[in-house]
Amino acid sequence: MGFRVVVGADIAGVEYKDLIKADLEADERVDEVIDVGVAVGEDIDYPHVGVKAAKMVADGTVDRAVLVCGTGMGMAISANKVPGVRACTAHDSFSVERLVLSNDAQALCLGARVIGPYLARRLVKEFFGYTFDASSASAPKVAAITEYESRLGSDNSPSAPTSC
Ligand SMILES: O=C(CO)[C@H](O)COP(=O)(O)O
């Protein structure tokens, strides 16, 4: 079975998002692409798009997200507010590889004001070439992130897992 993917962008990233969406729709590794906007000419701030897309990752509607804003950073910060979602900006091949293989991230965030469209599209292609190995040495580290997330206190700050 192929990937189910959500794509989203703000006004700064919409052209990149539409290019990436077309690439993904033509990618045989991808079964479904859901576009949560924005459309060209629409102006919705990145936190609303990022959180909407991240919720679809968290509830299992999709496997992965590709989110584009001016820098990729606002999308990542926003998407990471949704429990269970690991999102990060990555603008080079090695980071994209490690984003999946080290961090089991489901969301790749890109900055349309930082890298060109051909590099962005290439990085997305690479992102879908990796799958996390749950038996790897990275797995316990990712599990620790999840554990912290499950231990949010009333101040919304996580307490240390019992293993620490
Ligand atoms: O890059 C953005 C957020 O990280 C966004 O596209 C632009 O945000 P702004 O600089 O606050 O307008």
Image (cartoon, grey):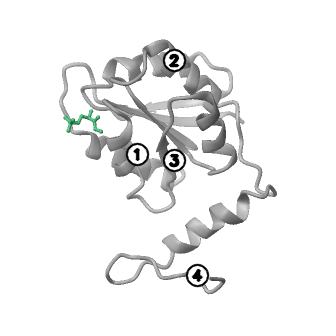
The kind of residue tagged 4 is: Pro
Question: How far apart are labels 2 and 3 at the CA level?
Answer: 28 Å
Q: Crowding near pointer 3: few (<14 within 10 Å), some, many (20+)?
A: some
Name the spot of residue 103 as percent of width and height, x first.
Answer: 62, 51
Whether residue 103 is situated above or below residue 131 in the rendered picture: below
Question: How far apart are labels 3 and 1 at the CA level?
Answer: 19 Å
Earlier in the chain: of badge 2 and badge 3, it is 3
Q: Which residue is mark 2?
A: 119
Q: Crowding near pointer 1: few (<14 within 10 Å), some, many (20+)?
A: many
Name the spot of residue 160 as percent of width and height, x first.
Answer: 53, 81
Whether residue 121 is situated above or below residue 111 in the rendered picture: above
Residue drawn at x 66%, y 83% as measured from the top left:
163
Q: Which residue is mark 1?
A: 76
Pick the residue in front: 141 or 61: 141
Q: Which residue is mark 4?
A: 161
Badge 1 marks a residue whose secondary structure is helix
Badge 3 marks a residue whose secondary structure is loop
Q: Which residue is mark 3?
A: 61
